[in-house]
Image (cartoon, grey):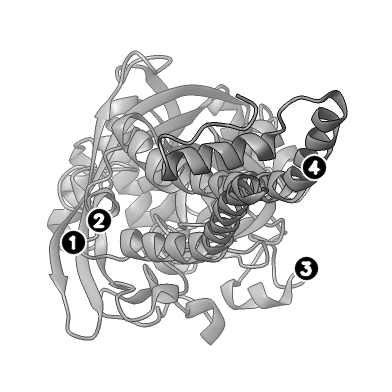
Amino acid sequence: MAKCGNKKTIILGVVGLLLVAFGVVLVFMVPVIMKQQVEKNVRIDPSSGFAYEMWRDLPVPFFMSIYLFNVVNPKEVLLGEKPRLEERGPYVYRERKQKTNITFHENGTVSFVELRTLHFDREKSIGSENDTICIPNIIVLISSMMTKDRSSFVRFILNAAFIGFEQGAFMNRTVNEILWGYSDPFLDFVATIVPNALPFKGKFGLFADFNNSNSGVFTVDTGVNDISKVQMVETWNGLKEVTFWNSEEANMINGTAGQMWPPFRTPSQPLEFYSPDACRSLSLVYEKEESYRGIPTYRYTAPSYLFANGSDYPPNEGFCPCVASGVMNVSSCRLNAPLFLSFPHFYNADPVFVNAVDGLHPSEEEHSLFLDLHPLTGIPMNCSIKMQLSLFTNAVSGITVLGEIKPVILPILWFSESGYLDGPVYNTYYNTLVMLPTVLDYLQYVFIALGLCFILVASVLPFVNQKWENLLQDTGETTGADQCSYDTKLLEDPEYDSPQT
């Protein structure tokens, strides 16, 4: 008589077990599916999909914001007073990076040259490229410093040339001239009497080598053979290490080219990359978990010891000769020109640098760099990399145009390279690598929960039926079991009539 109820119980139980089994399978299979999906999309392979297109030609907003330091009191500086600086800008340029000469090799690596082009964005800028800025005359100061140990006759000739061509310690130039280059009779004179003495041809500008140029030939691992090595630099310009510094560790080319990293990151793993502009490998460290428009990220920042001197951080001894911590002497890779790299406004540097000039206000919020990385894929979601370029100034015996300038590391400019995932690229990325795994993650538990509910109902149903039959029998009504028996016999014999009729 309970045959009909048993069928329902069995059906519910079987369905419940199947749902639980499917959910459990998803628990184990989702991570495997996601790992395969990530590996397929982040390897450098023309067939890997949108990640390859993103690597080849970054289709996301990328900007370079440049701030220049205007010297307010140049005449007083020549008399030995402290320089007073006024920050001008930002002068914002929309930046595009596109890889060309892409060549795949049989050993699982790929070589490329990345072209960089910059276009002025007036709407995002505060000021125009025609703004006039008073800055140190870099050619005068650098050439003077480079002759301070030469004979007095050499310095006499150099000083006479400065006076003859009306070259001073400071100059007024437009933003466009400072950044992208200007012509000067003195430069033509030097190029004529001493060919190849200057490290540039024609115009001189601080960022003349940035626009419509490249940063060398990178050869990186494609990740096809080992996904943990994808994007890692094999060589730069054919070199496995540089020769600018004084130790093997300092000269090593570590990490990636600075745009993507291997997937499946953990907080203990630093982000290492080689920067041709800094002539060295740099390392960022994990700070905290963040989120970018719903995408979970790890935030990485520069460690306080990045530009520390060898006394404060012994591993940096190879980058010396050093001054106080917080600035890095890059003269060895800039033709011995006394140039220094630091964070903007000497943020995180020894206070001696900030106190040597007026007008600097270091701030963590404005002058620290960060990079938000999606740890599953190793692709940056949002970043702002900030650096400052400074010049060492000092009076040199025999060079009268320098007056009585006090020794100081004088900031010239600082810049921020920033970019973020947006538009169709963000939508594709979010749907493929965030929304899909999230849905699968929730779905597996929905199946398990639903299956357990079916099993629970199947377990309780016989007891509920029994109690219901007992209640109906006590009241003299037809029970569910009798009805089930009647329905069964009626199917077997259409002329069968219930005893109750």
Mark 3 secondary-structure assignment: loop
Q: CA distance from mark 3 to mark 2?
A: 42 Å
Question: How many C-alpha atoms fall within 10 Å of the one at disc 2: few (<14), some, or many (≥20)?
Answer: some
Question: How many C-alpha atoms fall within 10 Å of the one at disc 4: few (<14), some, or many (≥20)?
Answer: some
Point out the tag, 3 or 1, that comes first from the N-terminus: 1
Kind of residue indicated by mark 4: Gln
Please give the label number shown on residue 47: 1
Callout count: 4
Point out the tag, 4 or 2, that comes first from the N-terminus: 2
- Residues at circles 3 and 1 in contact by the CB criterion of under 8 Å: no
Point out the tag, 2 or 1, that comes first from the N-terminus: 1
Q: CA distance from mark 2 to mark 1?
A: 8 Å
Point out the tag, 3 or 2, that comes first from the N-terminus: 2
Residue 124 visible within the image: yes
Kind of residue indicated by mark 1: Ser
- Residues at circles 2 and 1 in contact by the CB criterion of under 8 Å: yes
Q: CA distance from mark 4 to mark 2?
A: 65 Å
- Tag 2 residue: 52
Position of 352 relative to 265 (above/below)? above
Front tag of 3 and 1: 1
- Residues at circles 4 and 2 in contact by the CB criterion of under 8 Å: no
- Tag 3 residue: 312
Mark 4 secondary-structure assignment: helix
Position of 286 relative to 168 (above/below)? below
x and y percent of residue 95 in the render? 29, 36
Q: CA distance from mark 3 to mark 1?
A: 48 Å
Position of 94 relative to 456 (above/below)? above
Q: Residue drawn 41% across and 67% down?
A: 333
Q: Nearer the viewer, residue 287 or 210?
A: 287
Point out the tag, 1 or 4, that comes first from the N-terminus: 1
Front tag of 4 and 2: 4
